[in-house]
Image: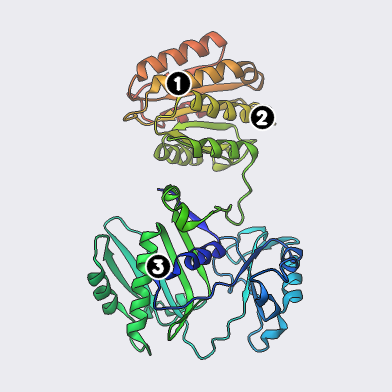
């Protein structure tokens, strides 16, 4: 399972799309626009369903990061809400997207997507908090009658309940009733909404879902702020329930390059797992690692021994990819690796590593690696590359032997090891050579 953050706009749209199925006793008016510029917002005026743009507005960046209020990135005027009209909102958006923004956490990036909504006057309504987190045997539902930007300061008023994944409707409601915060004006309605919320969370394959705050007055619900992550492996099951869903690059991270996009597209078409993130194209250590767990171990070892700044990429190929998929993945990596020599004249290092495979045919995947090496051996020689290999699993002896013989014939420096060698020892060998 991969937990992927989605925009607030998308989360609220999914609520609206499925509202009558889960929240039949409540009403929710979804009115929002997702825009990248002031002109894009202005262009919506007069469009069907956007009549609310003529009223008071609230504007926030929608870049999958939290604490926007504490970072001064929620634009509204509570005392005189009419002050934030369409033109004021458009100008605020353009001012924020014009340069780099720095959050209290130190993260820096460019604000490129915003959510615009009607200003909801709810001064007489309490602000509540609700969140659900996916677990293995039990999920955790967290509730509070003291929501808002200061929720962490009021954490002593938060109650949590573990809900077994096989709980029926009656058990679910009993557990939630026992955890409902004291002092609520409508505790039964709060519990009913929380029960509906949890069923919605579970059925629609969310991994994390937080609404902070929301207001509840009779049958009317206002979802004022939302954070959500979904299990992206459920995309094929949730096509109708989610609708078209885009997974944005988190704030502060660079947008994926063409090579990363190409591997992502190949991963989407494959039953295997193919991941690539370019960290530092000038780094001297490149990794071609089989397995998600192994990729973490190798990255940590490299960072510990030489520093994370020298790690050029992060990724994996696993799940028994085909020979052609492995070849294309390796081609992409070797192309990136050989575009320029190290500015300091150092040799580059290619780590072909992995744990002991359970079902991936090592000889088959290594055939793909061998094909790519044959295509790029001159480029590898021109920039100066040493190759270190450690692998185990089905047919690993054949794979290692073929790889060693091919590299020797091509004049590529290579050292090859099997499962008798510790998985990360090749990193130490490479750095001490």
In the rendered structure, the answer to whether residue 342 lies left or right of residue 244 reads: right
Spatial CA span between label 1 and label 3? 50 Å
Q: Secondary structure at mark 3?
A: helix
Residue 162 in the image: state x and y as whole percent: 28, 67
The image shows residue 75, relative to residue 7, as above or below, that is below
Q: Residue drawn 62% across and 80% down? A: 119
Can residue 173 be seen in the rendering of this structure?
yes
The residue where tag 3 is placed is: 21
Sequence-wise, which precedes: disc 3 or disc 2?
3
Can residue 306 be seen in the rendering of this structure?
no
The residue where tag 1 is placed is: 366
Q: Residue drawn 46% across and 55% down? A: 240
Q: Residue drawn 53% across and 8% down? A: 409
The residue where tag 2 is placed is: 342
Sequence-wise, which precedes: disc 1 or disc 2?
2
The image shows residue 255, relative to residue 384, as above or below, that is below
Residue 360 in the image: state x and y as whole percent: 37, 28
């Amino acid at each position: 399972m991969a937990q992927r953050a989605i925009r607030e706009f998308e989360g609220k749209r999914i609520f609206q799309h499925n509202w009558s199925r889960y929240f039949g006793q409540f009403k929710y008016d979804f009115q929002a626009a997702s825009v990248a510029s002031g002109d894009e917002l202005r262009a919506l005026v007069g469009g069907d369903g956007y009549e609310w743009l003529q009223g008071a507005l609230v504007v926030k960046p929608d870049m999958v990061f939290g604490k926007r209020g504490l970072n001064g990135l929620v634009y509204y005027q509570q005392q005189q809400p009419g002050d934030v009209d369409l033109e004021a909102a458009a100008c605020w958006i353009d001012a924020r997207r014009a340069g780099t923004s720095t959050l209290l956490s130190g993260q820096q990036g460019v604000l490129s997507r915003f959510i615009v909504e009607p200003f909801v006057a709810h001064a007489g309504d309490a602000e509540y908090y609700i969140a659900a987190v996916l677990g293995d045997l039990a999920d955790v539902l967290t509730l509070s009658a003291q929501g808002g930007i200061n929720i962490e300061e009021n954490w002593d008023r938060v109650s949590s309940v573990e809900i077994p994944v096989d709980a029926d409707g009656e058990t679910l409601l009993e557990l939630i009733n026992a955890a409902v915060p004291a002092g609520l004006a409508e505790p039964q309605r709060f519990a009913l909404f929380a029960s509906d919320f949890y069923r919605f969370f579970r059925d629609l394959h969310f991994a994390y879902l937080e609404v902070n705050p929301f207001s509840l007055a009779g049958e009317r619900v206002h979802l004022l702020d939302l954070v959500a992550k979904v299990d992206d492996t459920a995309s094929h099951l949730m096509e109708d329930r989610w609708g078209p869903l885009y997974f944005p690059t988190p704030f502060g991270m660079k947008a994926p390059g063409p090579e990363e996009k190409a591997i992502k597209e190949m991963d989407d078409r494959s039953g295997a797992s193919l991941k690539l993130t370019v960290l530092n194209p000038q780094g001297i250590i490149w990794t071609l690692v089989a397995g998600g767990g192994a990729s973490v171990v190798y990255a940590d070892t490299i960072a510990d021994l030489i520093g994370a700044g020298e790690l050029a990429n992060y990724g994996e190929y696993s799940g028994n990819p085909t020979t052609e998929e492995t070849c294309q993945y390796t081609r992409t990596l070797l192309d990136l690796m050989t575009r320029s020599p190290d500015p300091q004249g150092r040799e580059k290092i290619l780590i072909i590593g992995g744990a002991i495979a359970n079902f991936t045919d090592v000889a088959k995947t290594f055939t793909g690696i061998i094909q790519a090496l044959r295509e790029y051996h001159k480029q590898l020689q021109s920039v100066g590359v040493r190759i270190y290999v450690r692998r185990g699993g089905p047919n690993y002896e054949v794979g290692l032997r073929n790889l060693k013989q091919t590299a020797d014939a091509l004049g590529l420096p290579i050292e090859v090891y099997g499962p008798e060698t510790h998985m990360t020892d090749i990193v130490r060998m490479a750095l001490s050579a």
